[in-house]
Amino acid sequence: MNHAPAAKTVRTLIAPDKFKGSLTACEVADALAAGLRSATESRTAIECELLPLADGGDGSVDAAVASGFTRRSYTVTGPTGQPIQAGIAFDGTTAVVEVANSCGLGLLPDGKLEPLKASSRGFGEAVLFALSLNPGRIVLALGGSASTDGGMGMLTALGYTFRDADGRQLHGSGRDLAPIHSIERTTLSELADTELIVASDVCNPLRGAQGAPAVFGPQKGAGPEDVAALNRGLEHFVAKMTEAGVRDAAALAEHKGAGSAGGIGYACLLLGAKQVSGADYFLDLLDFNTRKDGCDIVITGEGSIDEQTLAGKLPAAVARRSGTRPIIAVAGRSLLPQERWSEMALTRVYTLAEYTDQDSSRDPALSAALLHRIGKDIGASLL
């Protein structure tokens, strides 16, 4: 008697980061999954488990929500004073609060950069809202900020009062750093009872040649004079923090990561936050290890695969944790030659650039369509 061969099922875990400027991690995962599912035959089925990821930058709240957290919305002060709806993610114990959706570059009206005017106040207000939910911990996802204010605006929202020489209250911005004359520190009791985690892989200090103004200021519209003014302002800010009784204010300014998000990393350190690797922390938070154990193949990716990826960005962390499973990477572009794929244990790298001559980096519809085609091609290779 002839027996038909047993049906085959290939289980894939689709765990990408965002394609910055084009698609969120959720949209990347959805497009790839749709393509994979369209590439089936009668004796083979492809199962897709989607795990959109983040590394502590923009998209962190969306990734947490996609993994089962609940989204909560709250009105905060945008980077230049306009009210906006910021979202946080909460699972009953852990809250994820994000700079990008509370005071980020993408929230500037008409995209107009405001390197001196922009403030981190909205992020502080989002943290305050998270505290009202009585979490055990708050994950502070830094990245994509519009401001370079050392977290002054954030601290203002959390109880600090900054005044100029005439006693007028300063609300926090890059321009407000230099006029600080006095600082009154108020410690919120809720903060004392809540673990604060900074999830970031930025290693820059607050000031100096590798500090926030010099390295990240130009991305936020700061010209050479602005960079110099912001650096002087941050020097003054640190000195005033020391005068206000923060004994380790100067040491924390030199801490790796103090310069992240325009210096919001520094303010978080002042509040006693613990800094961890953003990529590895989010992989743990989103239960990557358990999810990959049930899969045969892992598909990851980001907008660009290059030397920075090898240095420890999210796809590298995914590859490191995936064991002996085949690992496929998908990217907008890859600057990594094939002979170096083995450094991340990659089986194959697919790029959008191989599928089009057009620039897909700012074209979400084109990016999604190309990812669908790539997903279908990946699926065909698995049958």
Image (tube, rainbow, N blue to C red):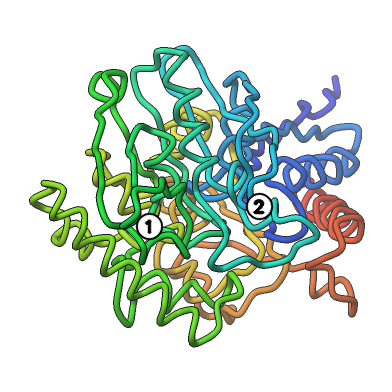
The residue that appears at 83% across and 23% down in the rendered structure is 3
The residue indicated by pointer 2 is 18
Relative to 189, is 243 on the left or the right?
left
Q: Residues within 10 Å of mark 1 (few under 14, many from 20)?
A: many
Residue 25 appears in the rendering: yes
Q: Position of residue 128 (x, y in %)?
A: 45, 26
Q: Nearer the viewer, residue 288 or 57?
A: 57
The residue indicated by pointer 1 is 150
Q: Position of residue 180 (x, y in %)?
A: 32, 58
- The quarter in which the N terminus is drawn is top right
Q: State which tag comes first along the sequence, 1 or 2.
A: 2
Considering every residue shown, the one lying at the far bottom of the view is 224
Q: Nearer the viewer, residue 100 or 313?
A: 100
Relative to 257, is 367 on the left or the right?
right
Q: Are marks 1 and 2 in contact (CB under 8 Å)?
A: no
Q: Could you tell me the amino acid type at mark 2?
A: Lys
The residue that appears at 34% across and 18% down in the rendered structure is 136
Q: Residues within 10 Å of mark 2 (few under 14, many from 20)?
A: many
Q: Could you tell me the amino acid type at mark 1?
A: Gly
